[in-house]
Amino acid sequence: MSAAKSLEQLLHSGALDKLLAHGARVAKAHEALRNQLEASLREHCRVVNIKGDTVIMMADSPVWATRLRLQTGAMLEILRERGFAELRTLRIKVSPVNVARAAVPRHGPQLSQSAASTLRRAAQSMDDVELRAVLERLAATGKAE
């Protein structure tokens, strides 16, 4: 027989039951805290695991993690009141959420008509060909006359 266990073995070994019970426990801790946290903080953190006497939370950013850390004592007290008496430590980790950001159109510098005109006049008075070209390119970014 191979090292891989069959689905039937997993179902009857109790391992799946333990995993489901652990998941339910983590979900219960998450809901207990979520209902007590201020609204702005709720959307930026979550309980992800419980190991021994430690509850592990994830925050979207270092800012939200810091705000959570300021409430560690209160959160542990809430959890103890909700049936998690063994919890003594709360660890907070940062795991940024990947959010697709809309592309912001880039706009080059916009010169006024007056500034563009001044740059064109300056370019015409230049003996240096390279400097003249640079000033003319810059003037071209201005508003049309």
Image (cartoon, rainbow, N blue to C red):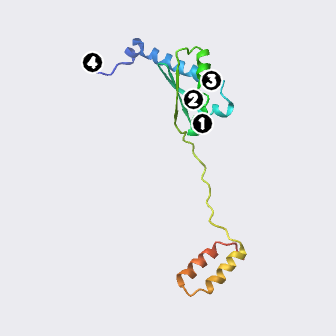
**Mark 2 vs mark 1: which is more N-terminal?**
2
For marks 2 and 1, give the CA distance.
Answer: 11 Å
| Quarter location, residue 35 | top right
**Mark 4 vs mark 2: which is more N-terminal?**
4
- Is residue 1 in view from this perspective? yes
- Between 14 and 58, the residue placed more toward the observer is 58
For marks 1 and 4, give the CA distance.
Answer: 50 Å
Amino acid at dot 2? Arg
Q: Which mark is residue 15?
A: none
- Residue on which the image places disc 3: 74
Which of the two marks, 2 or 1, is nearer to us in this view? 1
**Mark 2 vs mark 3: which is more N-terminal?**
2
- Residue on which the image places disc 4: 1
* Residue 138 % position (x, y): 61, 74
Q: Which secondary structure lies at badge 3? A: helix
Task: Tell me if label 2 and label 3 are in contact, CB under 8 Å.
Answer: no
**Mark 3 vs mark 4: which is more N-terminal?**
4
> For the view shown, which residue lies furthest in the left direction?
1
